[in-house]
Amino acid sequence: MFANDHRQRKTGIALCLGMAGLALTGPAAEAAFFEDWERSGYVGAEVRAFSQTAQHEAQSGQASASLELEAEYYREWEDSDLSLTITPFLRLDSSDPKRSHFDLREFYFQKINHNWELRAGVGKVFWGVTESRHLVDIINQTDLVENIDGEEKLGQPMVNLSIPSNWGTFDLFLLPYFRERTFPGPEGRLRSQPAVDTDHPIYESSAKQWHPDFALRYANYFGNFDVGLSYFYGTGRDPVFIPEFQPNGDVFLRPGYFLIQQLGLDLQYTAGPWLLKFEGIARSGKWQHFQAFTGGFEYTFYGVFGSNMDVGTLAEYHYDSRGDRADTPFNHDIFSGARLAFNDEHDTTFLGGMVYDPDNGATSLRAEFERRLGSKYKLIIEGQSFHNATPHDLTYSLRRDSFLQIALRRYF
């Protein structure tokens, strides 16, 4: 299903446009094809503008545009407690061919029994409680061409058995196929220097993408505590980058995917307006042995100044035992931010924050704004800027890539 990017993209375009066409052409067309199905989704246009010219010659200019489509189709067979969810996603980008891509975010059957739930197909699973980084979230691969914040994920082939009980919920996962991380191409902005060669990945396992991965998680709450314990064995989602020199002198980074074991803990304590959050992992493998955690709090002021608006203040600290050898900028950093929920008829929200490295002063600022326009449209504005990065900082290659992004989506 995922082995050939070109064939996948052509098939994805046909599937996405076909479903969107049925959804947008009217009730008659949809009823003829998706009778007894629930459907929702959006089509959108996005413009991204950069504050400076590109750092590297191959990169595109200071602005790009793209079209996006995501549709969700759901059907439930009540007599058998069986359901099917299909969520295709498509983006067409004007500047970076690697950002034009199709993905099946979800395509799974779900069977619900009194004592268990079973999902089989392509799905999405989220673990974690912290705001600025999700250390324990390891099931799905990051779709990095979608957004640099790492929140967007690729669909993951899986079989998931969930067993709820009075002692908590146990989840077991069989992950038979590995998804490689997406990266901007040589023409794209917000990419590393050198660029990542996604066409020639390296695998530790001789089975490559077909190495069977396993995971399990236990989740429960004890009073004001929500607790999650997880274990993962298989191909690590975070690649190790190996430089490769071309005959013409060019250098590319080959992503290496190695087998790991990871123990994870996510913990949240709720006390009125306070949320205390923690995520920690211990990871081991042939190429890496380390521990990392993210911890902090969120405090919410409700109805500020007598209005309907709620304001949440956030602060978190990042630690990675590898220090400067870490393949992430979150090795000794501080995050602070604010979340505003206007609680108005337009569902207006704002989230802004800053990640600061006290060792070298490298700083990243990010803001996200969302507001509904009428009953079918939503405006989404995002911006990110990079400051004071040194040549040894992992954000150094992004120092000229501060950007503002505006998207308008129509929901159906």
Image (cartoon, helix red, strand yellow):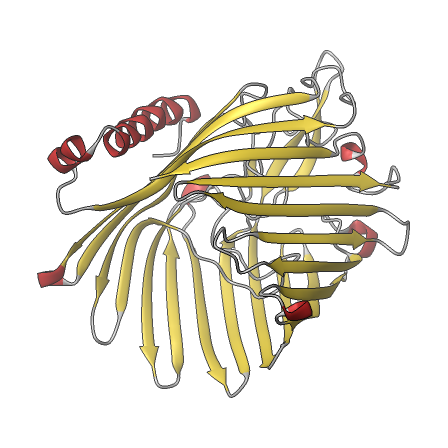
Q: Is residue 279 left or right of residue 376?
A: right
Front in this rendered view, residue 173 or 340? 340
Query: Residue farthest to the right?
Result: 360
Determine the residue located farthest toward the bottom in the rendered image: 223
* Residue 293 visible (yes or no): no
Residue 171 position by quadrant: bottom left
Q: Is residue 225 left or right of residue 16?
A: right
Picture coordinates of residue 227 (x, y %)? 53, 77
Residue 132 quadrant: bottom right
Q: Give residue 47's position: percent from left, percent from top.
A: 59, 27
Observer-nearest of 323 and 354: 354
Q: Quadrant of residue 26?
A: top left
Q: Residue at x 45, y 74 (%)?
A: 218
Query: In the drawing, does residue 112 fall left or right of residue 348?
Result: left
Residue 324 as seen in the image, left or right of residue 178: right
Q: Is residue 298 above or below residue 339?
A: below
Q: Position of residue 13 (x, y in %)?
A: 35, 25
Closer-to-camera residue (161/251):
161
Eyeballing the image, is 362 above or below 248?
A: below
Q: Residue at x 62, y 66 (%)?
A: 307
The outermost residue toward the left is 79
Q: Quadrant of the N terminus?
A: top left
Q: Nearer the viewer, residue 228 or 30?
A: 30
Residue 398's place in the image compared with 73, above or below, is: above
> Is residue 63 visible from the viewing direction of this image?
yes
Q: How many labels were placed on the picture?
A: 0
Give the residue drawn at x 90%, y 54%.
Answer: 359
Residue 200 percent coordinates (x, y): 56, 28
In the rendered image, which quarter contains the C terminus?
top left
Which residue corresponds to the image point at 54% horizontal and 58% vertical from the top-left? 137
Residue with the most extreme front position: 306
